[in-house]
Amino acid sequence: MSLPPAVTREQWLTARMEMHAREQELARRYDELRADRRRLPMVRIEKQYLFDGPAGPVTLPTLFDGCHQLIIQHFMFDPAWDTGCPSCAASADELCGGVLAQLRKRDTAFAMVSLAPFAKITSYKERRGWNFPWYSSYGTDFNYDFHVTLDERKAPVVYDYQSKAEILATDPGNELVRAEISVEVPGISCFLRSGDSVFHTYSTYGRGAEHVSTVRSYLELTALGGPAS
């Protein structure tokens, strides 16, 4: 194990102040990024998606459950699998009733959505002891339209806002997009409801979705934003 070098207090303070300046600059730029994110335009959802849930088929507006905002976590769960993605499961373990309750206080609903059939989702969810809403998009275009299931037989491969050709131009060995089978990827998508209309406001993938687990980090992805209090 490699340890940091041991220095005098004065040397440590000099190094720490240099790091502090970088941290302050990063925080300032991140504040600007959050403000710009809330000003992003949005696009109306025209397609009618049906999700399978505990009460049978439901529409995307139903997932809002009376709220104006909806956050969907795309949980990697291929229809051929018997269990969900271990990394997604580890993130799901961090979700507690408190997080969902605090999101709801801020007019924001939360749901997991996976491509696996609902029966598999239910069985796995019960074994894990989870209680968050979780729906199946099996048989719909939802996962393909939001680029969390990559399958050229269903739709052109796009990952993290880059086409397959763009990704391979800089990373020829990328197995994620070179695969000739269906590939599941993680992501988070945010939606806003206005009257009878639903709008897609934001989606993030890969590293952008890795460290989102707190109320504040979820809300910072939404159009209405707002830190947790």
Image (cartoon, rainbow, N blue to C red):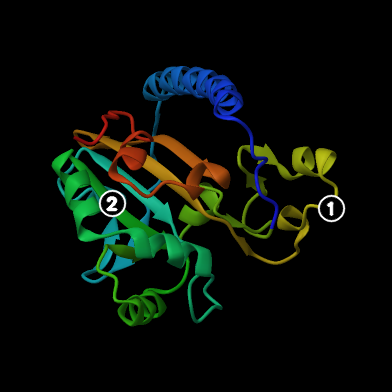
Determine the residue located farthest toward the front in the rendered image: 8
| Position of 31 relative to 121 (above/below) | above
Q: Report which residue position mark 2 lands on.
A: 110
- Residue 8: which quarter of the image? top right
- Residue 189: which quarter of the image? top left
Label of residue 173 in the image: 1
| Position of 98 relative to 204 (above/below) | below
**Of helix, strand and loop, which one carries label 2?**
strand
**Residue at 54% in and 24% down:** 13
Residue 95 horizontal/vertical position (percent): 31, 59
Label of residue 121 in the image: none
Residue 121 horizontal/vertical position (percent): 38, 74
**Residue at 36% in and 65% down:** 93
Pointer 2 local density, CA inside 10 Å: few below 14, some 14–19, many at least 20: many
Measure the alpha-carbon separation of dots 1 and 2.
36 Å
Amino acid marked by disc 1:
Gly
Residue 11 horizontal/vertical position (percent): 61, 25
Relative to 167, is 14 on the left or the right? left
Viewer-proximal residue among 118 and 112: 112
- Residue 108: which quarter of the image? top left
Residue 172 horizontal/vertical position (percent): 85, 47
Viewer-proximal residue among 109 and 98: 98
Q: Quadrant of the C terminus?
A: top left
Q: Quadrant of the N terminus?
A: bottom right
Viewer-proximal residue among 216 and 164: 216
First reached walking from the N terminus: tag 1 or tag 2? 2
**Residue at 70% in and 40% down:** 163
**Of helix, strand and loop, which one carries label 1?**
loop
